[in-house]
Image: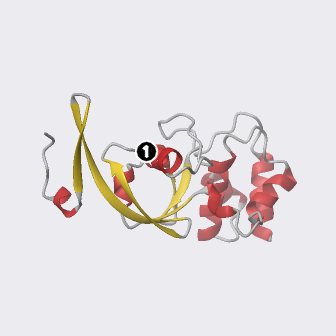
């Protein structure tokens, strides 16, 4: 049986037999794309798995699974983070925005429109992560310099195209 620490006593816990291993579960509450969520998570479950597999939000992509590529970037409490490196149980009380938050009331976000207009979308696999890194930047700094844009998306890899169109799209969105 896993050792229960004093910190873990704060949470409602469940033990479930899984083969020969026992997994620790807890219920967490947080806000996801502006809506309250209450869900049961495993102690070893990653945020990306919670979003994609449990909650059905498939916009966030998994690339490397090591936090190197940025495809799984979401905004957690105002900061762009790679969701493959965040344990779901740690988002208790947090505010999370995924790429699905950008499309509201049947309209694309100005950032999405700029990506389309500038041709900053190729295969599309890295696009959700790039959009969320850029959105986090624009929420913090509505008028970033080119250097600030480059730094903001430096953790996002795109193998299809150069970054020039991506930088131009973010600049265009900032102008709007």
Residue 128 vs residue 57, the one in the foreground? 57
Number of dots carrying numbers:
1
The residue positioned 47% from the left and 48% from the top of the image is 54
The residue positioned 69% from the left and 38% from the top of the image is 158
Residue 176 vs residue 104, the one in the foreground? 104
- The colour scheme of the drawn protein is secondary structure
Residue 124 vs residue 38, the one in the foreground? 38
Q: Quadrant of the C terminus?
A: bottom right
Q: Label 1, secondary structure: give it.
A: helix
Instruction: Choose top left, top right, bottom left or bottom right for residue 74.
Output: bottom right
Establish if 30 lies above or below 118. Answer: below
The residue positioned 39% from the left and 51% from the top of the image is 88
The residue positioned 14% from the left and 53% from the top of the image is 5
Establish if 69 lies above or below 12. Answer: above
Residue 98 in picture, x, y percent from top left: 58, 57
Residue that label 1 marks: 85
Establish if 156 lies above or below 113. Answer: above
Residue 123 in picture, x, y percent from top left: 76, 37
Q: Is residue 136 left or right of residue 18?
A: right
Q: Is residue 37 left or right of residue 89?
A: right
Residue furthest to the top in view is: 20
Q: Quadrant of the N terminus?
A: top left
Residue 18 in picture, x, y percent from top left: 27, 34
Count residues near mark 1 (Cα–Cα under 10 Å), then give few for <14, some for 14-19, many for 20+.
some
Residue 125 in picture, x, y percent from top left: 68, 40
Residue 112 vs residue 58, the one in the foreground? 58
């Amino acid at each position: 049986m896993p050792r229960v620490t004093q910190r873990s006593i704060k949470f409602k816990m469940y033990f479930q037999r899984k083969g020969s291993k026992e997994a620790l579960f807890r219920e967490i509450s947080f806000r996801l794309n502006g809506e309250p969520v209450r869900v049961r998570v495993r102690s070893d479950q990653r945020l990306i798995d919670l979003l994609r597999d449990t909650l059905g939000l498939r916009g966030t992509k998994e690339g490397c699974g090591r936090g190197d590529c940025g495809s799984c970037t979401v905004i957690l409490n105002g900061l762009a983070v790679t969701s493959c490196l965040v344990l779901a149980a740690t988002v208790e009380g947090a505010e999370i925005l995924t790429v699905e938050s950008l499309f509201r009331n049947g309209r694309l976000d100005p950032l999405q429109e700029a990506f389309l207009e500038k041709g900053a979308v190729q295969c599309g696999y890295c696009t959700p992560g790039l959009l969320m890194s850029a959105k986090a930047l624009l929420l913090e700094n509505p008028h970033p310099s080119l250097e600030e844009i480059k730094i903001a998306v430096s953790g996002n890899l795109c193998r299809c195209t150069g970054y020039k169109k991506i930088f131009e799209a973010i600049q265009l969105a900032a102008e709007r």
